Image: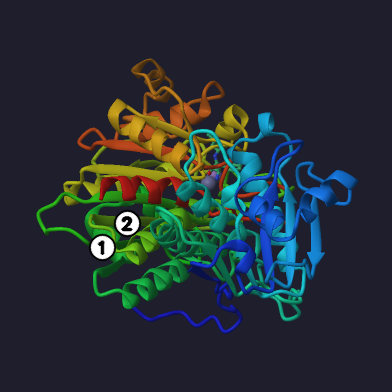
């Protein structure tokens, strides 16, 4: 297949190195040492060491009120006696009893943004010394590294005059400690995956087409001997009977693709995990056209695809000892003379027929054929990821992804991976009782279930194509990007998925 040429796209430029350093914090030769303090609490870890080395200067400055210890406060100190670092950034973590994972990560992010906007390109980070109940030092170090990496990301792919931050961080170091090497290695793999997912999510829909996504997968396959790629176009899909996926794409000048990446990290006979991503590169709603306001946001309707591509790449980067298959169902949902319409009845690859009552419920149509296709891999688990329903955002908002599965053990593993990576999901039921909402006289099912429990009836629809599978569904409509904010794609659920894969290895 011919690769597309997109001269306009500048490649993601965030290349941040993570290093370990055996010097104690006050002796680290760095342009900037970053330490954390807790409100009205004794100094500990790096902050205590720096305080001792400087003859109690940090304590004195806190006492005098020159260093603020409230949450999110930042104080830059220069040329502190007894300390090798040129500067010391003191981050306030606020009150101990309010400190949780979210506040910890937000404060690390704040430090990363502050450094991004200041004239340092290297820093030594000691924020993992801030204690957090039930999270060990290695966990705190991994999340600290990821948060600082995330904070230094700026979208620039399609800007001629992009804001060159004065001095973006190029390399950060951490104090070597128990578990540190593993934590930093995981952070490196995760950072690559998150960056990929965010960058793909943020790209505009005229450039990030199904063909472009296929090109990205092909590029990843080229980087690893352990990775193979297969791209199916409309002709191959027609031969397989993928009429639901084809119907969604048929109104667009950008033809659909089924993108398959496979990674071999374990014995050939070990059952793979399969990740399936919804890759609607733009969702106009089709003939059931969406309202104009905020329709641009539907460029993010391929964030399921971006998430599984990112998690796949993280897995390959980390060389996990598992087998993994990734399937992206990529299409553009457009109205037009060739578009599918409400009332159409489609015969899916599974043979089950679907009456289309709303062309805007297109995600489940591309996913159902991808799920049927996934049967051939005899997977240990199949997990699909999709910006599937507005109803999921109504139910769970922007903090939790929606998880649906009939397999309690798989659901528990995914919820646990979400907790471990602090990229959390919350389970919704997909009881048989809801299935009746999909009944129609004219086909085996319809593609919408009405107003009640819209996220769940979408999950129920998918479950009909996963009967042979150990399957779970993640609805990331609320978590994949920051709605109405400038930050764009979050890269979620790369953290949850990669953690799940790490746990399988
Ligand atoms: N991509 C949308 C879901 C979506 C909407 C995600 C808004 C994030 C923000 C999906 O294809 C869609 O349009 N779903 C419909 C389904 C309905 C027609 C049954 C929805 O949620 O309104
Ligand atoms: Mn839609
Ligand atoms: Zn959609």
Q: x%, y% of residue 135?
A: 49, 39
The residue at which mark 1 appears reads as 263
The answer to whether one can see residue 250 in this image is no
Disc 1 residue: CB within 8 Å of ligand 3? no
Q: Looking at the image, which residue is at 34% across and 36% down?
A: 472
The residue at which mark 2 appears reads as 326
Q: How many marks?
A: 2
Residue placed furthest toward the top: 433
The answer to whether one can see residue 194 in this image is yes
Q: Looking at the image, which residue is at 41% across and 19% down?
A: 434
Near mark 2 (Cα within 10 A), the count class, few <14, some 14-19 or many ≥20, is many
Q: Is residue 262 left or right of residue 390?
A: left
Regarding mark 2 in the picture, which secondary structure is present there?
Answer: strand
Disc 2 residue: CB within 8 Å of ligand 3? no
Which quarter of the rendering shows the N terminus?
bottom left
Q: x%, y% of residue 414?
A: 38, 37
Q: Looking at the image, which residue is at 53% across and 54% down?
A: 491
Q: Nearer the viewer, residue 67 or 339?
A: 67
Q: Looking at the image, which residue is at 71% across and 49% down?
A: 294
Q: x%, y% of residue 352?
A: 27, 37
Q: Nearer the viewer, mark 2 or mark 1?
A: 1
Residue 439 image label:
none
């Amino acid at each position: 297949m011919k690769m597309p040429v997109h001269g306009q796209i500048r490649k993601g430029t965030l290349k941040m190195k993570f290093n370990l350093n055996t010097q104690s914090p006050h002796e680290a030769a760095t342009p900037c040492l970053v330490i954390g303090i807790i409100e009205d609490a004794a100094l500990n870890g790096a902050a205590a060491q720096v305080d001792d080395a400087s003859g109690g200067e940090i304590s004195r400055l806190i006492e005098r009120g020159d260093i603020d210890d409230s949450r999110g406060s930042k104080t830059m100190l220069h040329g502190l006696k007894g300390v090798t670092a040129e500067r010391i950034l003191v981050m306030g973590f606020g009150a101990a009893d309010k400190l949780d994972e979210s506040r910890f990560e937000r404060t690390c992010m704040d430090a990363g943004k502050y450094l991004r906007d200041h004239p340092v390109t290297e820093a030594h980070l000691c924020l993992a010394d801030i204690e957090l109940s039930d999270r060990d030092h290695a966990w705190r170090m991994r999340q600290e590294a990821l948060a600082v990496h995330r904070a230094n990301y700026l979208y620039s792919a399609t800007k001629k005059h992009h804001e060159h931050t004065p001095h973006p961080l190029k390399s950060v170091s951490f104090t070597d400690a128990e578990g540190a090497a593993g934590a930093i290695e995981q952070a490196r793999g995760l950072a690559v995956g998150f960056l990929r997912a965010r960058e793909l999510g943020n790209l505009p829909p005229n450039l990030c087409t199904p063909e472009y996504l296929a090109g990205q997968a092909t590029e990843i396959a080229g980087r690893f001997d352990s990775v193979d790629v297969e791209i199916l176009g409309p002709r191959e899909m027609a031969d397989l009977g993928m009429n639901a996926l084809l119907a969604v794409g048929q109104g667009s000048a950008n033809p659909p693709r089924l993108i398959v990446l496979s990674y071999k990290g374990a014995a050939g006979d070990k059952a793979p995990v399969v990740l399936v991503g919804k890759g609607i590169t733009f969702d106009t709603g089709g003939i059931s056209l969406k309202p104009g306001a905020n329709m641009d946001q539907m460029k993010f309707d391929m964030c399921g695809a971006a998430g599984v591509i990112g998690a796949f790449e993280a897995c390959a980067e980390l060389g996990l000892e598992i087998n993994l298959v990734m399937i992206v169902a990529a299409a553009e949902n457009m109205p037009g003379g060739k578009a599918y319409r409400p009332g159409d009845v489609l015969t899916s690859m599974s043979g089950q027929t679907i009456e289309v009552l709303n062309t805007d419920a297109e995600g489940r149509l591309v996913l159902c054929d991808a799920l049927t296709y996934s049967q051939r891999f005899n997977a240990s688990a199949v997990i699909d990821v999709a910006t599937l329903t507005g109803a999921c955002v109504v139910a769970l908002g922007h903090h939790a992804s929606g998880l649906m599965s009939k397999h309690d053990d798989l659901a528990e593993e995914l919820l646990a991976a979400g907790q471990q990576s602090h990229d959390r999901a919350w389970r919704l039921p997909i009881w048989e009782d809801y299935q009746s909402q999909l009944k129609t006289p004219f086909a085996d099912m319809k593609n919408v279930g009405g107003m009640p429990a819209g996220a769940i009836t979408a999950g129920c629809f998918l479950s009909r194509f996963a009967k042979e599978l150990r399957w779970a569904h993640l609805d990331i409509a609320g978590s994949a990007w920051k709605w109405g904010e400038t930050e764009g794609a979050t890269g979620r659920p790369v953290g949850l998925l990669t953690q799940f894969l790490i746990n399988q290895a």
